[in-house]
Amino acid sequence: MNQVAIVMGSISDWPTMQSTAAILTELQIPFCKRIISAHRMPQTLQSFAQQAITEQIDVIIAGAGGAAHLPGMLAANTTRPVIGVPIESHALHGIDSLLSIVQMPAGVPVSTMAIGTAGAKNAALQAASILALQDRALQQRLTDYRAAQTQRSVESEAQLD
Ligand SMILES: Nc1c(C(=O)O)ncn1[C@@H]1O[C@H](COP(=O)(O)O)[C@@H](O)[C@H]1O
């Protein structure tokens, strides 16, 4: 059973979305990875999103760049939470991706992360927060993750001249 699906518009999004996969792995959250473009594979997108509930996918993380309609179209076809990651595009540095994902019409929400790798990491942590509502062991792993992060920041002060 995969609790999370990482969906990308293209294989070219994978270098960014690897950061999502790394954190899900660290937090021991089972996930699958799919390339499904709303533009290039509209029928696959519709069936994937409509089957998310029966496939027991609890959270969908969608990374896309440019005219990034993928997260919104997934959200249009499921009531599972969809977290959108705007991929940093070459032409407009991801502003196009961000605005395409964030400005959803009322009634079909997408939780929109920051552009690029920071957003990809936070998407995994946001998914973990949602899943931890019903999973005490995961909540503990998430708390430990934050504590380790705090510790690294504290220790980084020693690197100052
Ligand atoms: N935004 C979308 C969608 C979609 O939203 O359906 N499908 C592909 N793409 C994006 O196009 C960019 C360039 O893709 P290619 O590198 O394959 O040309 C990628 O960032 C992808 O997410």
Image (cartoon, rainbow, N blue to C red):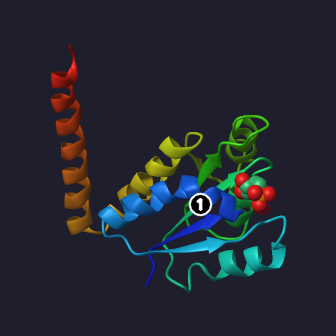
**Relative to 86, is 60 above or below?**
below
Residue 76 locus on image (x, y percent): 73, 64
Residue 40 locus on image (x, y percent): 84, 69
In front here: 53 or 87? 87
In front here: 109 or 145? 145
Q: Residue at x 79, y 37 (%)?
A: 91
Residue 96 locus on image (x, y percent): 76, 39
Decide if residue 121 is in sight here: yes
| Residue where numbered disc 1 is placed | 14
Residue 87 horizontal side relative to residue 54, left or right = right
Residue occupying the far top of the picture: 161
Q: Residue at x 44, y 56 (%)?
A: 124
Q: How many marks?
A: 1
In front here: 109 or 89? 89
Residue 156 locus on image (x, y percent): 21, 29
Quarter occupied by the N terminus: bottom left
Residue 139 horizontal side relative to residue 103, left or right = left
**Location of residue 132 by image quarter:** bottom left
**Relative to 75, is 3 above or below?**
below
Quarter occupied by the C terminus: top left
Mark 1 CB within 8 Å of ligand 1: no
**Location of residue 131 by image quarter:** bottom left
Decide if residue 69 is in sight here: no
On the rendering, which quadrant does ligand 1 occupy?
bottom right
Crowding at dot 1, Cα within 10 Å, few <14 / some 14-19 / many 20+, comes out as many
Residue 66 horizontal side relative to residue 111, left or right = right
Q: Residue at x 48, y 42 (%)?
A: 118
**Location of residue 138 by image quarter:** bottom left
Residue kind at label 1, given as amino acid type: Trp
Q: Residue at x 57, y 43 (%)?
A: 116
SS assignment at label 1: helix
